[in-house]
Every structure is written in structure tokens, then in C-alpha cells.
Image (cartoon, grey):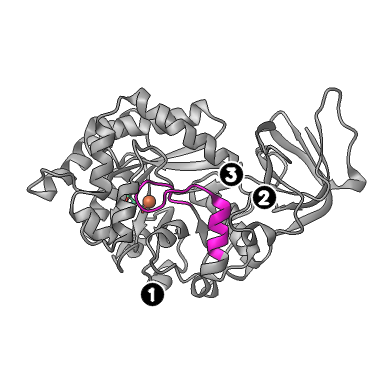
């Protein structure tokens, strides 16, 4: 495939690029009036139109005049596998109930678990598949998917098998995360009994089937303490799972510190962080990840992105797509929230949604930037004036085509 006359080819970086942090996030390296040549599913060459090669025999040519081309979005935190929406809780919330109150009454995560436990693996897959196609159309090419609505050995395994199957049967690149420690299920008089089940039964079974790349814990008041988080995460590490932590969503929970201590790939949420947590992250290799869709939906504070960037930290953006706190999987809207609510610039938001997300789910060698040898997975926008237009048009549809590994997987009705 040869994409020609690209108004601007965004996010061109050296092959061995690392995450992008602090002041560097203000820059998105680009080539104007560019071409991009994809062969055998990978990026073969790119440059200015002056150096554009002739198409090879039978090769598809796409004219991208007036359009931007950029790497597919990397959504490094989702709960894409779930049984049912929870819009009734949305109405309770409008009438004044808090997220914590809904959870305490058996709503929330336990409500999702009850519904998911009743479904067969095939039925759960069938309910998840349309959401996978939905996010592909939004330009997401790589996605992390968590368990955590099963909360029994068999149901957690079922969720992770469904997540793996999404990776096999759709064009999405999928990484999976075991989140058995999402909530203590009903019926446990002693919470340590459930933690023991997670550590002694679930983790070994998940590892035996090779179902999880990461281990996650909801480290939060009313859910799991930092000490419990550390115990669970260390148990997962012993089976080769890398930590990723739900940290500091509702309170200063200790989640950031435990994430840094255990070498987490990322700490996610961060609505409640202060200077101590920012200091704790400095010098670590843990990616702070903002989930502004959850902050928007729950009407909470947003992570203090400007302070974090001023401290030299990197930042990733993800959707947290789930039925309770973020029922939407659109990365372009996360960029809008990052700009409007977190005062990030469009360039910072794009870096957070591509290269830094790729670091947070270990796909940076193949995704997150435009470089030769990386996956031929790109978004071609509609004719738009500039990168800033993407977050600016916050409810608009700026995507024309989504190409994954050199194959067209989505095309807007009117380009
Ligand atoms: O990331 N915070 C914990 N887990 C999810 C929400 C889960 C739910 O409410 O179903 C989150 O926001
Ligand atoms: Fe989450």
C-alpha cells in the first residue's frame, strides 16, 4: 500500500525511541507533504513526496491530500470484556449517589460480576466483539483488556480467554491483565480468604494457561490496601506477570508508591495525587496513565498533568472503557479531555495516546510511532486543518480510514 500526498505524517521517530517525557511531550515530529509505503504489513519507507517511489505492481495507492496520517491509538487500560451496561447506576448517580455508595450497596463491580458469571464463554465473546469493532473504528489498534468482573476462578479464566480470543479473531493487538483483585466478592466474611484464592489458585491457573501479561489490583479505600496490593502483585510477578496498578482514583491510596516499589509498568487513574506521589514517580520506569473518561463520567478531579509534566514525568492516556465508570472507548475524546480539562496541548495529548500508551503496554517496538519495520497500522483523517483539530472537534468524527498491518479495517461512510 502506498499512501501519497499526505498533508502531514505525524509521530515520526527513531526506531529505538523510548517514552516521551516532560518538555519533550510538547513536540510531535512530522513530515509535511509525505508518503508512507507499507509492505507485508509493515512500514517499509516514508519521506517527502520528492522521494516517493513508484507503486509496485498490484499495489494499492491512496491519495491523502489535505489529510493527516498518524499511528493508530494505543489504549493501554480497558475493561472491554463485560456482560452488560450499567446505565441504571448512571441514573442513580444523577440523583446524587456516589460511586463508592453504589459499590457499597452491591452495585458497581459486584453487579457486573453477577451478570458476567451467568454467561457462557461464547456468549461473553459475542457481547464483547462489537465493542472491539467499535474501538477499531475509533482508530485504536492496540488495546489492553483486564479481567476483574469474574471474581471466581472459572469466571476470571473465562474473561481472560475471551480477551485473548479478541486478540486472535480481530485485527486488534491485545495484551491481557489479570485483575482478580478488583473487589472482594459478596459472601466473604474474611477478606484474606479471597486474597488467598487470588494468590494461591487464580494466579497459578491464569499462568498455566498463559492468559495474562500483567497483574493488576484496585488499590483503593474499600477495595485493596497497599500491603494487600503488594502481596498480590508479587505473587503475579513470581509467575511472570508485570504489575499495572489502579492507583489513586478516589483517594491518596498508596497505589503510586506500591507501583513504583514493585516496578509496575504503569500506575493508572491518578485523580488523587500530590507532590509526594509525583516525587515517587521521578526516576522510575513506571508510566503514569490518566483515564480522563472516568474523571469526566464520575465528575471528579483530573490528574494534575501540568505539574506532572513540569516535574519531567511522561504521561499516557487511556479510556478505561468499562460499564461502571467510563462507558466509552474513544481515544480522540480522551485527547479532548486532556486538552480541555488537563490543559495539555494537542501535541502532548497525541504523544500520550500513542508512543506513551505503547510503552505502557509493551508494544513500543512495533507500535506508537512511524518508523521503518514497525506495524503498518495507521489512521488517515478526513481533510482537517491541523492536529489541534482532533481534540478541538470534541464530538466530531475526524477519522476517515483505519489501516491495521497494511489492511483497511475501517472506512468512514463519506471520507
Ligand atoms: O477503572 N476503578 C476500578 N475499576 C474500574 C471501574 C469498574 C467498575 O465500576 O465497573 C475503573 O474505573
Ligand atoms: Fe480501570
Is 104 left, or right, of 327 in this rendering?
Answer: left
Q: Which residues are magenta?
A: 319-338
Q: Are marks 2 and 1 in contact (CB under 8 Å)?
A: no
In terms of sequence position, does the residue under pointer 2 or pointer 1 come before the other?
A: 1
Residue behind mark 1: 274
Where is residue 49? Give x, y as percent.
89, 46
Residue behind mark 2: 398
Residue behind mark 3: 138
Q: In the picture, residue 57 is in which quadrant?
A: top right
**In the rendered image of this protein, does residue 241 appear above or below residue 305?**
above
**In the rendered image of this protein, does residue 41 appear above or below residue 143?**
above
> Under tag 3, what secondary structure?
loop
Mark pair 3, 2: CA separation: 9 Å
Q: Foreground mark, 2 or 1?
A: 2
In terms of sequence position, does the residue under pointer 3 or pointer 2 come before the other?
A: 3
Is 68 left, or right, of 98 in this rendering?
Answer: right
Residue most extreme to the right: 50
In terms of sequence position, does the residue under pointer 3 or pointer 1 come before the other?
A: 3
Amino acid at each position: 500500500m502506498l499512501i501519497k500526498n499526505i498533508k502531514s505524517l505525524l509521530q515520526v521517530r527513531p526506531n529505538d525511541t523510548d517514552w516521551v517525557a516532560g518538555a519533550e511531550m510538547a513536540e510531535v515530529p512530522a513530515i509535511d507533504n509525505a508518503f508512507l509505503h507499507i509492505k507485508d504489513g509493515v512500514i517499509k519507507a516514508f519521506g517527502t513526496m520528492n522521494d516517493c517511489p513508484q507503486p509496485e505492481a498490484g499495489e494499492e495507492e491512496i491519495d491523502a491530500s489535505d489529510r493527516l496520517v498518524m499511528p493508530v491509538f494505543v489504549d493501554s487500560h480497558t475493561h472491554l470484556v463485560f456482560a452488560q451496561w450499567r446505565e441504571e447506576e448512571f441514573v442513580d448517580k444523577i440523583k446524587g449517589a456516589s460511586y463508592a455508595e453504589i459499590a457499597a450497596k452491591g452495585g458497581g463491580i459486584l453487579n457486573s460480576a453477577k451478570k458476567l458469571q451467568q454467561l457462557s464463554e461464547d456468549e461473553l465473546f459475542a457481547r464483547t466483539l462489537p465493542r472491539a469493532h467499535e474501538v477499531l473504528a475509533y482508530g485504536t489498534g492496540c488495546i489492553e483488556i483486564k479481567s476483574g468482573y469474574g471474581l471466581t476462578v472459572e469466571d476470571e479464566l473465562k474473561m481472560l480467554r475471551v480477551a485473548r480470543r479478541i486478540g486472535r479473531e480481530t485485527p486488534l493487538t491485545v495484551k491481557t491483565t489479570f485483575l482478580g483483585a478488583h473487589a472482594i466478592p459478596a459472601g466473604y466474611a474474611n477478606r484474606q480468604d479471597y486474597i488467598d484464592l487470588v494468590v494461591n489458585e487464580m494466579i497459578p491457573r491464569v499462568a498455566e494457561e498463559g492468559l495474562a501479561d500483567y497483574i493488576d489490583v484496585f488499590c483503593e479505600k474499600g477495595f485493596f490496601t497497599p500491603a494487600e496490593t503488594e502481596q498480590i502483585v508479587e505473587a503475579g510477578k513470581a509467575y511472570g506477570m508485570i504489575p499495572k496498578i489502579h492507583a489513586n482514583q478516589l483517594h491518596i491510596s498508596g497505589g503510586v508508591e506500591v507501583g513504583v516499589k514493585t516496578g509496575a509498568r504503569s500506575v493508572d487513574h491518578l485523580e488523587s495525587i500530590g507532590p509526594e506521589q509525583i516525587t515517587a514517580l521521578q526516576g522510575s520506569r513506571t508510566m503514569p496513565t490518566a483515564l480522563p473518561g472516568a474523571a469526566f463520567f464520575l465528575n471528579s478531579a483530573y490528574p494534575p498533568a501540568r505539574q506532572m509534566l513540569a516535574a519531567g514525568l511522561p504521561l499516557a492516556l487511556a479510556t478505561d472503557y468499562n460499564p461502571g465508570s467510563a462507558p466509552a472507548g474513544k481515544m480522540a475524546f480522551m485527547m479532548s479531555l486532556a486538552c480541555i480539562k488537563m490543559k495539555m496541548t494537542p501535541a502532548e495529548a497525541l504523544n500520550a495516546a500513542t508512543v506513551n500508551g505503547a510503552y505502557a503496554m509493551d508494544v513500543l517496538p512495533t507500535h506508537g510511532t512511524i518508523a521503518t519495520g514497525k506495524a503498518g497500522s495507521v489512521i488517515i483523517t478526513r481533510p482537517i486543518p491541523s492536529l489541534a483539530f482532533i481534540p478541538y472537534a470534541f464530538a466530531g468524527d475526524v477519522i476517515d480510514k483505519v489501516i491495521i498491518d497494511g489492511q483497511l479495517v475501517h472506512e468512514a461512510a463519506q471520507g
